Image (cartoon, rainbow, N blue to C red):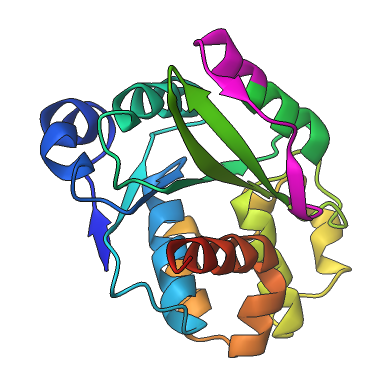
Amino acid sequence: MFVQLKPHYEAFYRFVFNRLMKLDALILCEGRTETEVVKRIAEKLGISLREFSVGVTDCEGIEVVPRMTSAVLALAKLSRRLKVMVVVIDAENMDVESRLRSFTNSLKAKGAQTSTPSPINEQVYSIKVTVENRTLVMIIAVSGDFILPFQRHKLEDHVVRLLLLNGKVSEEDLRRYRDSKEVINRDRIVEFIENSDEECVRHAFRHIHLALLKLSSMLRH
């Protein structure tokens, strides 16, 4: 079962002490759209987490993610039930390795210890994070389709890939755009996912699919 947490201060500072103790896992996304995408992909691809309590929240932008993640890590030691956290974060103008390194460095700067990242695929990694005596697993999924001709890479890239797979746009069409955000209406992303073939969604959002599968596997073991 997904538990939708309200963003930013309300999620972490008003409700966290009540909610955190009841969560098996926590999924952190950059924005509200990303949280909806994660939930729709889980539903579309039949990844059932109903027997578990999984919190989903957005952190309102790329610069907030490291700060909010470290805040949750500090609180996580209070809950022995929390097993794993998933972070879905845009690559932006970095490659995957640089984005991952930047993210883990921000955790270390806040006092956390991190293991060497273990690849699940080329855009999904797992690390062990230790805060004081509390260790848990974090799955980091980096969004961006690096084959597409855009300067910055983000969640919208995967929607463009979905449109390509569905024949809604052509590779030639993409030459007119500098950013994947210019190709699609962000408010229609969830609609595109719901109206697309299951196999196309699995292919286009492979990083989120694999992160959710890893989460499901870890919660069951």
Report the number of numbered marks. 0
Give the residue at x 81% y 61%.
174
* Nearer-the-camera pick, 4 or 175: 4
Q: Which residues are magenta?
A: 105-123
Is residue 6 found left or right of 188 in the rendered image? left
- Residue 182 falls left or right of residue 144: left
Taking the image as drawn, is residue 49 in sight? Answer: yes
Task: Pick the quarter of the image with the N terminus.
Answer: bottom left
In-front residue for pair 117/69: 117
Q: Is residue 12 above or below residue 157?
A: above
**213, above or below 120, in the image:** below
Q: Is residue 13 magenta?
A: no
Residue at 22% x, 41% y is 20
* Residue under the point 69% across and 22% down: 102
Point 75% across, 45% down: residue:
118
- Whether 216 is drawn above or below 106: the answer is below
Q: Which x, y percent locates residue 79?
A: 26, 37
Q: Quadrant of residue 59 in the image? A: top left
121 and 63: which one is in front? Answer: 121
Q: Position of residue 189 (x, y in %)?
A: 49, 66
**Closer to the camera in the image, 163 or 17:** 17
Please state the horizontal and vertical placement of residue 200, each as a whole percent of the image.
Answer: 67, 83
Q: Is residue 182 visible to us here?
A: no
Q: Position of residue 19 (x, y in %)?
A: 16, 44
Q: Is residue 113 left or right of residue 219?
A: right
